[in-house]
Image (spheres, rainbow, N blue to C red):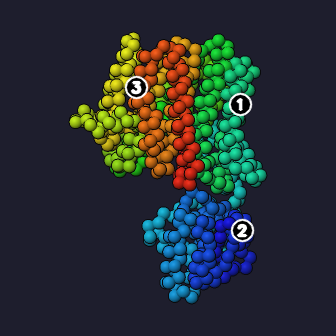
Amino acid sequence: MPTAILTGQPVPGSSIETDLRSLGFDVRTAVDTTEAETLLAAVPGDQRVAVVDARFVGHPHALRLGLIDPRFPLAAVPGAVTAQPAGRQALTRAVAREHSAGGGTTLLDNLADRVVTALDADGCAVHRPELGSLVATVPADPQARNEARQAVAAVDDEAVRLKSAVKSRDGFFTTHFISPYSRYIARWCARRGLTPNQVTTASLLTALIAAGSAATGTRGGYVVAGVLLLCSFVLDCVDGQIARYALQYSTLGAWLDATFDRAKEYAYYAGLALGAARGGDDVWAFALGAMILQTCRHVVDFSFNEANHDATANTSPTAALSDKLDSVGWTVWVRRMIVLPIGERWAMIAVLTAATTPRITFCVLLVGCAFAATYTTAGRVLRSLTRKAKRTDRAAQALADLADNGPIASFVARVSPARLGAPFLIALAGTAVLMVSLFSGVTWAPVAGAFVYAIAAGQALSRALKGALDWLVPPLFRAAEYCTVLILAAKAEVNGALPAAFGLVAAVAYHHYDTVYRIRGNAGASPAWLVRAIGGHEGRTLLVTVLAAALTASQFTVALTVLAVAVALLVLFESIRFWVSAGAPAVHDEGEPA
């Protein structure tokens, strides 16, 4: 149980002790710094501890935001400071300093705030939550206390808490058609002890049932699938709202939320393809194309953000215009809808599934996503060309990790005697050669194209990716590898080739998403042994082209299936091992992904 140390003489009529106990704290009282330091030392090192001024006046949710958020080692609001085990040493050192400054006998006024000042002076990162209209203060006299209590009474704590459970930057559909009621579902779940992870799992199961309904290939099945997909999305919103409402963040929850959204959407694509096949329509190429396009869109987002989030001199006229448009109300919603974020996209898929056919659903989805991808990528290219950003070594390393170069490309990068040109242009040239070879009609031409592509991949990463457009290198590699699998499977023209290709791309895409969230958590890329074991993007591309050239169409299908299973087992094993380990980072994306 976490411990809260109340410092100073209790104030008659104060609810602070009750509020702290309602947040799960065991409350102890200290009347001087000697006793505060003694109580602090008595708290086990693996437990959270807080120092709170007994004169504190404020909303319970202000205390909740400041004292129980698990994402931050050190956090504070006016009159209160808390430390998790990772920040415990820094807190103990700051309290000891205040003890010495006071001569060890008298509790200094505003001890909690002075401790925060000492932590800042030590260079410690102290999280200070945005309180908005919530009150958190330490009144200096009875009149100020009365005014603070009136301010607390004037603001509905629960209404603020409910509002803050909703993301500040959601899409139009989510904001206006889901969040107005999903926040109340989230509160209902939180009050009954349901956790975000349980709701996340329920959302996944609902989406899988929706995929199964679509796989029936009947009109009734399609209608049920559309309804269930929307229900799954509502639950997907609810799990995050529970986490924000109750501050129940966890590393496992971050991993589940990051991976299940993609698993749900891509499983639904597979369900639609299976349902269409039952009706005699083969749309596996469309399903795989939709998955490739959506994954590449995400890689563009990830690469651009990683390349620029810590860049210096990171301004451009294009960015300034974008910021100006964001200040005009209606343009904000138009620009959010035009990129077809998850809410709009799933709503569109659900309606089209219920009302039309899988082929029409995929065609509209592909056109919409292609337009959104063109819009967002063009805007980011313009920003990159007009800004004078200086990328950091960390950004360059993140892009190199996202590139996913394997042993072949890494060897080329080490032994190349000369650098042929800018990384982006080299990657673009290698990808172009590969694409031309795939459509040449010569059996072994794709193998030669993949070999050139592998050399280009090594050359592209033989220098730091700090050029204006070098953030496009990882998306190019993703598109090249995924499209190679799609094209060769389609050219096989046998039953099962495209579903096997779908499975392989899904497994590889999972590996790439896993890498993204490791980087976001400052945990680095996937381990080198895993990248070597699954060959890197260039190794897998070369292997698939060799298999397509050397084997019959039926044998190629079997080989793709075996490769898909092998890659899936390896990446899932390592991913699960990492994300459930104690050292995994808590990654929480407060933006709505594309």
Kind of residue at disc 3: Leu
Q: How crowded is mark 2: few (under 14 residues within 10 Å), some or many (20 or more)?
A: some
Callout 1 amino acid:
Ile
Q: How far apart are marks 3 and 1 (CA)?
A: 36 Å
Q: Nearer the viewer, mark 3 or mark 2?
A: 3
> Which residue is found at the position 48% from the left and 63% from the top?
125
User: At numbered mark 3, what does the secondary structure look like: helix, strand or loop?
Assistant: helix
Residues 363 and 502: in front is 502
Q: Name the residue under label 3.
A: 542
Q: Is the residue 448 above or below the residue 540 in the image?
A: above
- Identify the residue at horizontal 52%, vertical 88% (top origin): 103
Q: In this view, does 487 lie above or below 400?
A: above
Answer whether residue 349 is visible to the viewer in this image.
no
The percent coordinates of residue 142 (x first, y second) are 66, 79
Residue at figure coordinates x 53%, y 14% from the top left: 554
- Residue annotated with mark 2: 21
Q: Nearer the viewer, mark 3 or mark 1?
A: 3
Considering depth in this image, is 263 or 14 the residue closer to the camera? Answer: 263
